[in-house]
Image (tube, coloured by chain):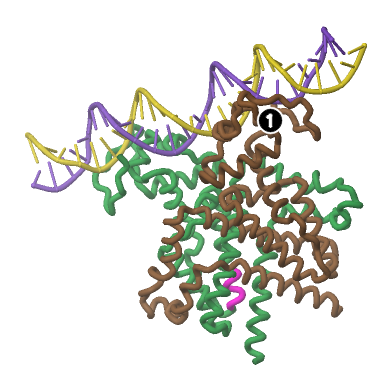
Chain colours: A brown, B green, C purple, D yellow
Amino acid sequence: MTTRVPQERRRRRPTRSGVLLSEDLIVETALRLIGEHGPEALSVRRLGAALGCDPTALYRYFHDTDDLVLAIADRIIGDAMAGFTAGDDWVASLREMALRVRAGYLAHPRAAAMAAHRVTRRRNEIRAVETGIGLLLTAGFPPADAARLYLAFIDTVLSHAATEAAFHALPPQQRQADHRSWRDVYQDLDPASYPSLTLVRRELPAMADSSFEPAVDLLLEALAARARALKRR
Amino acid sequence: MTTRVPQERRRRRPTRSGVLLSEDLIVETALRLIGEHGPEALSVRRLGAALGCDPTALYRYFHDTDDLVLAIADRIIGDAMAGFTAGDDWVASLREMALRVRAGYLAHPRAAAMAAHRVTRRRNEIRAVETGIGLLLTAGFPPADAARLYLAFIDTVLSHAATEAAFHALPPQQRQADHRSWRDVYQDLDPASYPSLTLVRRELPAMADSSFEPAVDLLLEALAARARALKRR
DNA sequence: CGCCTTACGTCAACAGGGTTGACCCAATGT
DNA sequence: ACATTGGGTCAACCCTGTTGACGTAAGGCG
């Protein structure tokens, strides 16, 4: 039966190949595996092989693979937010949070692509939510607004980061083809049918660039405007 | 060997149960299957059973399941944008585009979650880009801004929709666990360590709600503000 | 110091997944 | 009417996650 992981693990038995298993070691090995051989390389059996233990030993540490994926996600969040402290400027702080999360995802693109849209319920995520909502509260938003607006903000950041990560996780061949298509496909369109595209034709190659920062900045602009409106009243 | 599907399919042999297979029929059946029996009901074997044919017959029409998924995605995009025309109000029009894309994704979450991070440079997408950039041009943005801002807008919409779809594509068990966690895990936290979360405690169950519309509205607010700033100059 | 409990690593097995190659029938163009 | 071949079928392969039984050795305790 799957057992809930206790706070302290006592009985440590070396595996057949002499390795001492631990939650951390498993997560790290999983990240390495995904990073080296792609997201589809993460399977219970392969992870067991990489760890030098029987695949089913993992079920002593995680209820199922979903539990493991959540642990991986939380590790990424933790690494990204390590050492971050909110400053006086709430807009700048939220911006840095966004950039950190994005950097964390891009550091493990393939792992992020598979874990990005989950609620981990774990320590690092909870701390990040605490920090983010705290920033919106200092901005003057009432609790209900702070919660809802933080959700809108962080979901946008996470979604964008996940999309970017997924793109970076593509094989280079496909990624380059994606880049080229903005140049090629949109090159010779009928001006009568596509007047607007023809007008901005010269700007289209820039569409291959990331829209992460422009989108975050737009969001922060809107939040700042709403905060100002609150204070005027 | 898997063969590329030709433009016209000639030899039509009725299946053992008398059904005449076709690319369209397979795509439609797949969508129906997902809609009726949940996202995880889409498998080659189940699809074969639903069609009344041998599962491997599908490989005469699609190279692999990925190919099938892309065909499904193309259908979703077409359905979502069918009949849409931009109106006079550019903000309202962009908003409707966003809601349509999202509705299309949510109608077929599993398929959307699988194909969301891919780019299909096909006619429907090109027309959507034409429409969107056209709207920003009528808003008064110069071409370079229109292109960049449209990218920020549509990437946010697509990323959000993909995230929502991915969530809906989760097995019900995990989905419910994600929902519950906002109530359970975040409810009894140490007030000293998590003061902000404690303050907004009563609002947290709402975090399970979608942030799609709040996020889109924030973006549109920022865009409208920038457009106004342009006109003042 | 040595017993007892039990955590946990191991093993075998099952159900379900995608995909392939061989087989063969019948729909089609000539 | 015949030869061609598209395409439906079948058996098989290897992958996957997960479970239950089993036994060994680690650690607490007398």
Label 1 sits on residue: A20
Nearest the viewer among A171 and B165 is: A171
In the picture, measured across the screen, residue A232 lies left or right of residue A151, that is right
Which residue is outermost to the bottom?
Answer: B233
Whether residue B138 is visible, yes or no, is: yes
Task: Report the residue at 80% width, 35% height from top.
Answer: A7
Magenta stretch, main secondary structure class: helix
In the picture, measured across the screen, residue B152 lies left or right of residue B33, that is right
Q: Secondary structure at mark 1?
A: loop
Check the image and report above or below for A188 versus B45: below
Task: Report the residue at 47% width, 36% height from top.
Answer: B46
The quarter of the image holding the C terminus of chain B is bottom right
Quadrant in which residue B136 is drawn: bottom right
- Residue B181: x and y in percent read 76, 45
- Residue A14: x and y in percent read 68, 25
- Residue A142: x and y in percent read 85, 65
- Residue B50: x and y in percent read 45, 37
Whether residue B173 is visible, yes or no, is: no
> Which residues lie in the magenta part?
B90-95
In the picture, measured across the screen, residue A124 lies left or right of residue B137, that is right
